[in-house]
Amino acid sequence: MAAHYSIGIDYGTNSVRALIVDVATGREVGTKVCPYPSGTDGIFTDPKDHNVARQSPADWLFGLEKSVKGALALARRARGFRPELVIGIGVDTTGSTPLPVDANLKPLAFYPEFKRNRNALAWLWKDHSGADEAAAITAAARASRPHYLAKCGGTYSSEWFFSKIWHCLRADPKVFKAAHTWVEFADWIPAVLAGITNPADLKPGVCPAGHKAMYNDSWGGLPDKEFLGSLDPELGALRDRLYPKAYPADVVAGYLCEEWAAKLGLPKGLPIAVGAFDAHLGAVGSGVREGVLSKIIGTSTCDIMVAPRDAGIPDIPGVCGIVDGSVIPGCLGIEAGQSAVGDIFNWFVRVVCQGKGKLHEELTARARKLRPGQSGLLALDWNNGNRTILVDPRLTGLLMGQTLHTTREEIYRALIEATAYGARAIVDRIAEYGVAIDSIVCCGGIAEKNPMLMQIYADVLGRPMMISRSAQTCALGAAVFGAVVAGSAAGGHDSTGAAQKAMCGVKRTVYKPIEANRAVYDKLYGLYRKLHDSFGVAGHTEDLSAAMKELLKIKEGAA
Amino acid sequence: MAAHYSIGIDYGTNSVRALIVDVATGREVGTKVCPYPSGTDGIFTDPKDHNVARQSPADWLFGLEKSVKGALALARRARGFRPELVIGIGVDTTGSTPLPVDANLKPLAFYPEFKRNRNALAWLWKDHSGADEAAAITAAARASRPHYLAKCGGTYSSEWFFSKIWHCLRADPKVFKAAHTWVEFADWIPAVLAGITNPADLKPGVCPAGHKAMYNDSWGGLPDKEFLGSLDPELGALRDRLYPKAYPADVVAGYLCEEWAAKLGLPKGLPIAVGAFDAHLGAVGSGVREGVLSKIIGTSTCDIMVAPRDAGIPDIPGVCGIVDGSVIPGCLGIEAGQSAVGDIFNWFVRVVCQGKGKLHEELTARARKLRPGQSGLLALDWNNGNRTILVDPRLTGLLMGQTLHTTREEIYRALIEATAYGARAIVDRIAEYGVAIDSIVCCGGIAEKNPMLMQIYADVLGRPMMISRSAQTCALGAAVFGAVVAGSAAGGHDSTGAAQKAMCGVKRTVYKPIEANRAVYDKLYGLYRKLHDSFGVAGHTEDLSAAMKELLKIKEGAA
């Protein structure tokens, strides 16, 4: 019997990847990455405003064709592969990355009059222009719709759907007026592949909707018109042009249209899964399940867990979102994350040390020889704000304990440790609210390349750390849903769990907590939490006068 | 009439300088620096213990001959100069730098059996080995002799005389036992020049005695035998072999002996002034007087003020010392200082950035373009502890406000600003206790080379900042006392004030506070003090949760 294949298309911050996977074994027969050709690494920034980060939908389409055709070309070399054996397509993207479009779902950016307007591009997840709007949405919801916030950690973020759209309305009303509606990146790509041009035919993902747009079936979908209208009547009016219902990724968003079938060299009519976010499908690809937290460690991190619908999980303060079906259909998906992880290490290496990429390896090699606590340093991992559990973009980095002898590698290690403490704050908070975490599966280049970081995380978190078998878990997670929308009748799978079991796994190396290290890191984490709460929690007061001395004592104990 | 000349000999941390000055005009006719030949830049460290910093008395003698002969060789080229026209010698050194010696004032380090023993060397001012002993001395004095501490800021430092000697007694009793007594660097050099070998003939300086050894005429000189004996009976016994009385620098310590007169090529019998510390004589050389604070900015800083004896100046908590006659005879000398200033900038440039010296200039050029507050950063200047006003060596550095966009020059400027805030904390504290500071005269290479730093200090301190005319104020201050011990009859001066008036002055450039900058720095200083008190003052609690946001607001206001 011939094998069957699914294609996962994974849109990251700087590039898009296509992956072709055998749905019975998880064997990856072809993969191709295409960097976005425009902007700086695919991002349009504003030298005058660090908050701005935009992306071109033209880059997405360019990358779609390049990556899928490239992956197919490689797959053709694999024994037994033929494009006709592809049975489905799944898509994940960054988000919330809303795109202003016309009534035919055509991006405003494709119109000549908006060609040079950054506001007509897609508003990339890490765009923070809407900070004021986020604060106003939070305030309004707290006053009149507290349940809206309860599912997204208690604070609406500047990175999310309505903050961005409202900011566009205020900052560039011409773009807002010209847009018929706004579509999430993750919803737009499946629509393009399926040739959908009528907004009413869109099948939006519950993952973007629930995590970033306050969507919930229990209150009738998106925030109500009155609430949005109270922010601005134009937002209220937009509500009617947004979607009434959102779907998990095991639902078919549409079928591959003739135009794209021809472009890509794939059979017309292939089922395309409803889109979801990269982190959520990365979790699926790394085998997330009850008790196993999936952590994608990249420039930032995303932590994804699932819990049974009927487990009675309460709202968890400071956790980005709890959304039914956003990860595994039928389960609650829980999302948390850190605003910067690899970005902090990169900042230190590239900006402070003005080193090249290989300095990461040099510093790691030297930092690996340090014992826990030996640096005498303690850092807060807030150089890009704090996403979980404080949900506050207006927090900044902090480093303490430096002397005249503090070395580069000690700082480097302290920054890694800071991100581990940030990770522990998340796991502790979630566990406190009844979601048990027994182990952690990581994916992302840093997890694969840096055993020191993995051991520090195991020691700080007190749990075994594993690494996803696939190096491209997001694309694999998308391919899982390509196999699920195809169904067993077409050679795919009938459930996400069955598809994960067949297609996903972890590597043999497991990083287990070392007891002696844990004891030191428990003390350091105690100090981290003192700083964390002092600088991050309004009204919190603490006697910090012993903190530097305690760090010195730990340092002397380690030496 | 032929001019007359005085020689100032200034022993720094890494080198010794001799300076030959016309006592009527301050004209400098010859100067020579001799780096200490041993150790690392003249310092013997212990790779296993960052607290250790020792120095070889052989280096001091080598440097004495080299520097004086070198200065004389240069002076011979000046019109009218002849060695016979030299009328006196003054000496300053680092301190507290106690040296273990035998009953003939010969250093133990000169004995073969102690040649390789670091503990038999001089214990350099920045040696912190005696931290435990300092804490025990502080505790004992608090309990039974609170008046001892009242004159030295309330805390006895690990950098001071008895902490070091007691630590030697505990850590290396063989050295302690072999030593007949311990002599301060500043007292030993005049004794060497005068050929004094009997400890009873020593004329110890009141500057080292009063500032570092709890000496005060009002309680009979050094701490009493019972008190020292309560620390350790051996320390009590040592008390009898230390000096009964100490003297200001306008007193003759002795007269140039035949041996050294021949070695140096100077007339035998020249009067040699009682020794004092470099910072105190630097203040004299920069023209310190009532209302004018002298600030020596080097690896660390020393702030020196004087006040009339009868001004009723109370004890000032956290200020290193108030000693009658330690700066200008007949006046109270007040000493404060910061444990690290240039050292912090050097640490950042050399260790963190791994740059060479010229990176200081590059970073300064870029940092100069930043407006106050624009970096969004705030640092504590405690990488080497805090000398004034917290008197706590077990404090460490802190940097906050960093984002993913924070640049090297922003950090560099923040570190400079941190030292300015530390300087302001000192001036505010002293002013609060009735010692008015109208302006500040700086000396040291950093003050001369870095106009940005001077402007930042003027803006932060809200006072005009001047620079001493001489580039070698410590040696000049020593030469002032060479002229005073010679007296007017020999062509010198009869008072320190008269000698200063003739020999010292300031440069034309004055850095005046810029009002707009002051307003921003007042806000930043407010935040600095919140951190300063939170991390530095036991029992202090503060709500710091707005601190990062306030910094961001100031940053946005500056942009």
Image (cartoon, coloured by chain):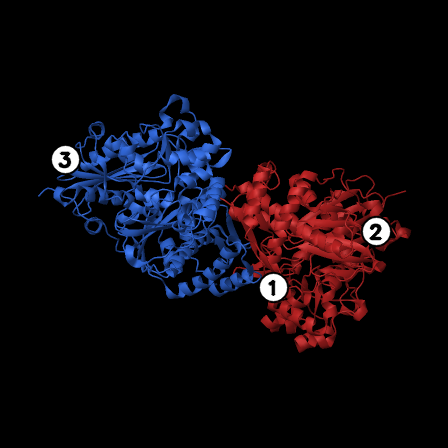
Chain colours: A red, B blue
Residue at mark 3: chain: B
Is residue A453 something one can see in this rendering?
A: no
The percent coordinates of residue A276 (x first, y second) are 75, 58
Can you give x and y, in whole percent of width and height, for residue B515 in the image? 38, 66
Cα gap from disc 3 to disc 2, whole angstroms: 102 Å
Tag 3 secondary structure: helix
Residue placed farthest to the front in the image? B226
Q: Is residue B264 left or right of residue B437?
A: left
> Could you tell whether B356 is left or right of B534 in the image?
left
**Residue A203 location, quadrant:** bottom right
Check disc 1 and report the residue beneath it.
A539
**Foreground pick, A94 / A435:** A435
Among the two numbered marks 2 and 1 on one chain, the one whose residue lies closer to the N terminus: 2
Front residue of this view, candidates B297 and B212:
B212
Tag 2 residue: A483
- Badge number at residue B84: 3
Residue A506 position, x and y percent, is: 77, 42
**Number of disc labels:** 3
Relative to the observer, which residue lies in front, A321 or B137?
B137
Given the image, on which type of amino acid does mark 3 rest? Glu
Instruction: Tell me the distance, in whole angstroms, between the alpha carbons under discs 2 and 1.
Output: 51 Å
Between marks 3 and 1, how big is the CA–CA gap? 73 Å
Quadrant containing the N terminus of chain B in the rendered view? top left
Q: In the figure, A208 relative to A549: above or below? A: below
C-beta proximity under 8 Å, tags 2 and 1? no
Q: Local crowd at mark 1 within 10 Å, few (<14), some, or many (≥20)?
A: some
